[in-house]
Image (spheres, helix red, strand yellow):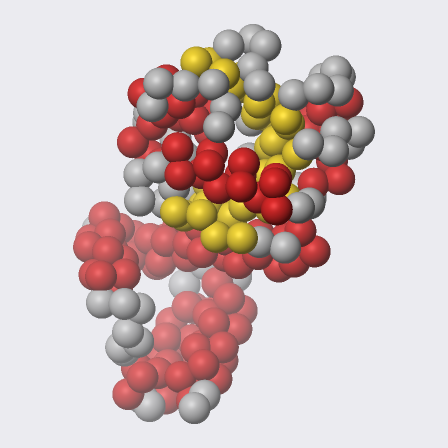
Amino acid sequence: MFRTVTVVGRGRVGAAVAERLAERGIEVADDGDLQLLCVPDAAISEVAAAIPIGPWVAHVSGATQLGALAPHVNRFSVHPLQTFRRGGGAAQLDGAFAAISADDGDGMRHARWLAETLGLAPFELSDSVRPLYHAGASIASNYLVTLFRSAAALFAEAGAPPEALVPLLERTIENGFDLTGPIARGDTDTVLRHETAISASSHPELREMYDVLARLTQSQHSAP
């Protein structure tokens, strides 16, 4: 659909995207038929406004709505639902999903083409619910980091190796997020002992987080 693509920004996502396009035989050039903005969210509007009207313009942000691409009307977005590291290459795109958004069917067809060319599995996302979608993505990715660091801090204080948590996390995912442990068993005494131990530890600030997650886990586990 696009023979040439200009990848604007070569950070974590832009570098992987440019590499994958080249692998798929798409010319990555300065004057592409598609101007693909892989820049920080705060810069999207400014960069888009500086592009002359003519080519298609798209961004890869999960949080930014299509209006940021004004004044362009030939526009869409493809958000790779994945976390990236610098130097990780195009393989980071493999197996990931992508949220695609556009103003009309033509834009959606272009978005779907790009997602599939990048090796992503696309699903359509209404621009109006983008904040809710991105909140879910942030909980799954960003807050997992917070949870691991919190658990690792308690492990370290107990003299247990924090790296031992990694296989536990991986198996939880492999098991389809099937809930086990004291809340699944209805073992409130163990939960209370957890709360007491955390409060007495050198990380008492984690008690509030534990309480909130315990209540939420209990309500979800009890739901029909």
Q: Nearest the camera: 44 or 181?
A: 44
Q: Is residue 120 left or right of residue 180?
A: right
170 vs 218: above or below: above
Residue shown at the point (74%, 33%) measured from the top left: 73
Q: Nearer the viewer, residue 125 or 173?
A: 125
Place of residue 29 in the rendered image (x, y in percent of width and height, measured from the top left): 51, 10
Task: Residue 179: give x, y in percent of width and height.
Answer: 30, 76
Q: Relative to residue 200, is residue 106 depicted above or below?
A: above
Count of numbered circles in the view: 0
- Residue at the image point whose x is 40% and y is 23% from the top: 21
Asked whether the viewer can see residue 128, the reply is yes
Residue at image x 61%, y 40%?
106
Q: Eyeballing the image, is 92 above or below 123?
A: above
Image coordinates for residue 53, horizontal then vertical, percent: 75, 20
In the image, taking residue 132 as reference, residue 94 lies left or right, namely left
As drawn, the residue found furthest toward the top would be: 30
Say whether residue 97 is left or right of residue 163: right
